[in-house]
Amino acid sequence: MKPNLENVYYRMNDKGEIKLSVLFCLRYADIPLSDSDLKHLMLSATTVDFLELCGIIDELSPDNYIKKVWRDEEEKYILTEQGTETIDVFDDKIMASVRASIKKTVDEYLKREGQRAQIKCEMVPIGIDAYNVDIELKEGKNTLLSMSIFAGRKERAARYAKGFRNNPTGLFERITEVLNEAADESEKEE
């Protein structure tokens, strides 16, 4: 990807502005981003020092602005509630040209990836060696399926997650079949 030359004369040096820009990037993307994707988007959209960016991203997690989740068999970043509230209040402190550049870069990324949060699948620890699998299937902005399934052990949760990722629409179709059959039986009894 060629560098963005719009902000070439404005180098982001302020630590607070860089932190807000990272939060803005995550909020605008509205999907979990891997460490490398987040850094790539920030470096493509802004003129920030790579080592400084790495340090700032590392600081945002212990400060409870971002957290890691397990998605698509990879750790990815999402905003915490505190991170969302912070960027909602302070996003106007980021230069308009920087915000526009981040939006443009993220839009290109989402277009390339062909996803805008269409499928979500996350293994969520709920106790000692106990997991739920949270799944969601969307079509555009419409949620077709959203559920949390108790899986027990991590191995079974990983198996469920893999099965959903391999055929998310198949699961949706099977659930609707079961619901239709149950409705038909209920109508017969009435």
Image: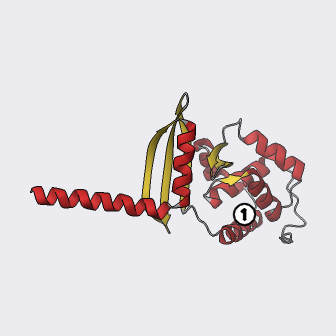
Residue 153: x and y in percent read: 53, 35
Of the 4 image quadrants, the one containing the C terminus is bottom left
Q: Is residue 153 left or right of residue 23?
A: left
The residue closer to the viewer here, 170 or 49, is 170
Give the residue displayed 57% in from the left and 61% down from the top: 117
Residue 144 visible in rendering:
no
Name the spot of residue 128 as percent of width and height, x first.
55, 27
Residue at 27% x, 62% y: name it. 180
Q: Is residue 96 left or right of residue 169?
A: right
Q: Position of residue 142 (x, y in %)?
A: 44, 65
Residue 90 in the figure: left or right of residue 160: right
> Would you identify the image quadrant in which residue 184 lies?
bottom left
Residue under the image location 79 percent in, 55 percent down: 39
Look at the picture and state if 178 lies above or below 57. Answer: below
Q: Is residue 112 visible?
A: yes
Colouring scheme, one of rainbow, by chain, secondary structure, one colour: secondary structure
Residue of label 1: 99
Q: Secondary structure at mark 1?
A: helix
Amino acid at dot 1? Arg
Q: Is residue 7 above or below residue 78?
A: below
Q: Nearer the viewer, residue 136 or 86?
A: 136
